[in-house]
Structures are given as C-alpha cells and as structure tokens.
Image: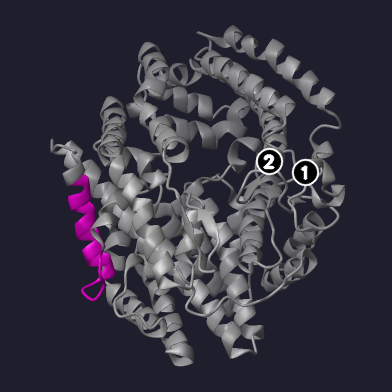
Amino acid sequence: MTESHTPLRSEVPESDTWDLTQLYKTPEGWEEDFKKLQSSYGRVGDFRGRLAESASVLAECLEFEKGIDLLTDQLNQYAALIVAGDSSDATALSREARLDSLLVKVGEAFSFLSPEIQAIGDAEFERFLSDPALVDWVVPMRKLRRRKPHTLTAGEERLMALGSAAVRGHGETFSQLTNVDMRFGSLKDGEGRERELTQSSFSSFLQQSDPQVRKAAFHQFYKEFSEHKFTLAASLASSVRADVFYARARNHASAREAALFSDDVPVAIYDNLISTVRGNLDTLFRYFDLRKRVLKLGEIHHYDTYVPMVENLKTKVCWDEAVEKVLASLAPLGKEYVDTLAHGLRGGRWCDRYENKGKRSGAFSYGTFTSPPYIMMNYKEDVFSDVYTLTHEAGHSMHTWYARGAQLYQNYGYPIFLAEVASTFNEVLLTEHLLKTADDPKLRAFILNRQIDDFRGTLYRQTMFAEFEREAHAAEEAGDALTLERFTGIYRKLLADFFGPRFLIDSELELECLRIPHFYSAFYVYKYATGLSAAVALATQVLESGDASRYLAFLRSGGSKFPVETLREAGVDMSTPAPVQATLDLFARRVAELEELIG
C-alpha cells in the first residue's frame, strides 16, 4: 500500500481484506438467510402464554430464540462489515437498512418473553431450573431473574419500548448538531498549509509542535461550541433526565445504580475508583510540570497536553513487521494464543488492513459465535501507534475466540467491562516488550511518553468524566435545575482539581462537558479506567509468574459470570482500591523514568 492516493475499494488487493466468504459465499446466500428470518421469527408467537406450562416448553422457546439470534448475528455481521468497508456502496447500505427494519419487528415479536418468564412464581421457577431440560439455560435464566424487581408488566414494557426513540432523541440531536451542522472553519498547520478544522482533525492540530497552532485551533474549535452552548446544555440535560426517568420507572435507587445493575457492579467500585485516583493527583501535576519544562512553555494549557514530548519517531513499520512485533509481545500467553492469532492476521484474513475510499474510520473487532473475530484497521506504516491499535483489536478478537470455544452461545458474550480488559492487556504487554528491546534512548522515551499519555487519558481523564456524570445525575435527582451554568460549574471545579494549581485553565474548556459523546450515554467511561487497572494487574501477574493459565481462563469465561466475580477468579479484586492504586504506582514509575531520560 505505497500509493500516494487513497484507493477505491475495488482497487484493494483481496489479500489485504477480510474473507467474508466464511459468512456467506455470495450475497445471494445472505438474501436466502434474510428470507429465512422473515418467514421464521413470527413462530415465536406459538409460545405466547405457554412459558409457565413446563420447563420443556420454556427450553423449547429459548432454543428457538437462540436459533433466531444466531441467524440474526450472521446476517448483521455480514451487512455491517460490507458497509464498513465501503459506505458508498448503495447495495450494501440498502441491505443493512432492510435488516435494521426487520430487526425492529423481530424485537417486537419477542418482547413478551421477559415479562412472561418473570411472571412465573418463585417456587415454580426454581423447580424449572432443576429440570434437565433447562440445564444449559441456568446461567442466563438466573441473570434474567435478577431483573424481576425492575421488569414491568407486558403493557408497560411495550410503552417503554415504543417511547424509547422519543425519550432518547437527545442523542441524535447531539450527533447531528456536532457532526453535521457545526462548522469550525479552517486554519494553517505548522507547515503553513490551510486545513479544515473538524471534530476529527482537532486532535491532529493539538499534536502540532507549534504552540500557536495548538492555541489557535483550541480557541477556534470552542468558539463554535460556544455559539451552540445553550442548545447543547439543553440536550445534555435531556439525556440526564432520561437516565433518571428510566431508573425511576424500573424501580432503581438512582440512575447510576440502574446503569451498573446489568453488570452487577456495586457503586462502591465506582466511588473507590474516583477516591483512589483523587488521592494520586500529585503525580499527574508533576507530569504536567515535566511537560511544561520539556516543551519550554511559559504556562501550560489544556491544548499543550497532547503534543508528543518526544518528537515523533520517523519510523516505518510495514504490516508484516507490525504483526511480528505484536506476536512477539504476546509470547507469554503461549503457543495456542500466538499461533491462532498469527493464522488470523496472515492467511486467515481476519483483518481488513488498509484505508480505502468510503471505508469507515478508526478500528474495531467484530466477531460472533460462528464466525471469525474480524478486525477492521486503517493501518498506516508511518503511524507507530497503529501497531498498538492492532494489538488492542487483536485482544478483543482473541477474547471472542476463546470465549466461544469454551462456552455455550448463551454464555459466551462478555460485557464491555471485561472487553476493555482483554484489549488493554495486549497493549501493556506490547509496551513491556518494546521497552525491553529498545536500545535507543529516544525510542525508549517515546514509548514511555506514549504509555504515560495513555494512562493519563484512560485512568485520570476518564475518572474525571465519571465523576462529572455522577455529580450531574445527582443534581437532577436532588431536584436541581440542570442549566448551562450548573453543568459548567460542576465541570470547572473538576478541571481545577484534576489539572492542579500550576495549570492555566482557559474558560472555554468548561464547554468540554457539552462535547463528550459518552456523556449522552452515561456511566460507561468508568469502565475504561477499571479495565486498564485490571489489565495492568493481570499483565503483571503473567509476566512475573510466567504462568498465563489464569488469564486464559478469564478469556474463556466469556459472560458466564458477572465481571467482578470473573476478575476475582483471575486474581484481580476490583472491589478493593488495590488494582487502581497499582496502576497509578506504575504511572508514577514511568513519569520518574521519563524525567531521568528527558527532564
């Protein structure tokens, strides 16, 4: 992929794309399964009103649902991956839209299952679970049953489903406003080239070595947000109110408890994260001081925290070399792990490697119970961080591969709380491998700087976000008015606390609370911080003991247990502050080492 232009999808060599024939040999095969889904899902109605008859009837219904889910997974994966590869493909877009429309009908047809199962009496339910007919369904039925206090009547559930699009409309409003309507203009980069300023290019401008370019981009970017700040504040307030509405409607004590309920995560873990990180802010302030010295800044602003402190290395890592680096770093996980991933990234064509016109940006991993755990990349040889992106997505894919090999379909799917562990774990191993093999002090400093900034962005920044979500929802639940001033007031205090007394906070930065997409789908960001902490603990365990068995058991567990229990069995107790503190201690050691190299 040495061409200077971005190729059309049709110009990309087949070997550089994923092999979707493992899903369907031809598009006609997809159409056949689509018709099969159309004609079969309605048969779930045969079970309506009968689920309490016997364990065997319930088991038969669950198996029917499983068959529909398997079919849906394959249809959805194929349709989504084709669109991700080329979003300008009208046929692919039509295929995906038709499936989306059908899945709404499928969801409506199956909506009676949960309320009807919850209506089974406690004694009868326990008798059902002891019946051999339901032996494979005990785990998902136990998980479903714990939702009983928060499951409404069938009629109420229907109303909740019908109203969800209206109540959650703030998300679409935010997306359309920030991604479509807003215009940020253009400005010159460090080389004097006029470039458009967008949501995507903003981060690129903040990494420019010229501080005046960073400053101009920051103020120009937030000027547009300031023009729409009241609309954005109203949208965020609607989002918070929707969270509180759903929590109260489903009889949860708070919106936060409602969000943590599905993973059975105690709010104490959320609060421990915040208090532990707050207890270690001095190291972060020390790092900001180091940044200020190295970059020779008279004063440090938020827009100075993304530019590399070590000049970006002029490296060129081709795809095959990147794969070799990743595989070498994962050697502690054993032959099966490495050989499986090696096959997938090479001849197995799990990965769609390079950018093409119309291809979705970024990267992701997407696997199902019956398909390869595909990876999408936009790999660039001159972007060293893409090697990290590769191992990150490979972590997700191998998590899926191990889980589906060890669990039944109904138990293999793992929650996001655990997904972030497997991906970040691989990044930790890659950093350790690169540091061990880095002879050049400049390369070592570059790797240290990268990990420090990753930790800062994941542990400190996401924890600050988590505290903002906690405080904003608590304000609504206490009856406070969620105005622009209320939001920015909460956020301004957090900025002062998390950046410290020697950091100059521009007033525009208060508006950042209005532009974080996760805030419109709250109580998610804390999982990034807890996931990193668990990953560091597990990686340390593997590297120090030389034994990866507990970690591999963690991957195989899938979603068979709740996350906190799964991690505890792997040797990490997230109910204590210890894993978070250990990660903060590693952050402090990395800062000290970087100070010695460049400070």
> In the rendered structure, which segment of residues is drawn in magenta?
486-505
Q: Mark 2: which secondary structure?
A: loop
- The answer to whether 390 is drawn above or below residue 369 in the figure is below
Q: Is residue 502 magenta?
A: yes
Q: Which residue is mark 2?
A: 358
Query: Can you see residue 144?
Result: yes
Query: Which quadrant: the N terminus?
Result: bottom right
Residue at image location 73% in from the left, 53% down from the top: 354
Query: What is the spatial separation of the Cα atoms under label 2 and label 1, in whole angstroms?
Result: 8 Å
Task: Answer whether labels 2 and 1 touch (C-beta < 8 Å).
Answer: yes
Type of residue at label 1? Leu
Nearer-the-camera pick, 537 or 438: 438
- The answer to whether 521 is drawn above or below residue 248 in the figure is below
Q: Position of residue 213 (x, y in %)?
A: 43, 66
**How many labels, in total?**
2
The circle on residue 8 is: 1
Q: Is residue 384 left or right of residue 150?
A: right
Type of residue at label 2? Gly
Q: Mark 1: which secondary structure?
A: loop
Q: Position of residue 58 (x, y in %)?
A: 57, 19
Residue 444 occupies which quadrant of the picture? bottom right
Q: Earlier in the sequence, mark 2 or mark 1?
A: 1
Q: Is residue 39 left or right of residue 593?
A: right
Badge 2, how many Cα within 10 Å: few under 14, some, many 20+?
Answer: some
Secondary structure predominantly adopted by residues drawn in magenta: helix
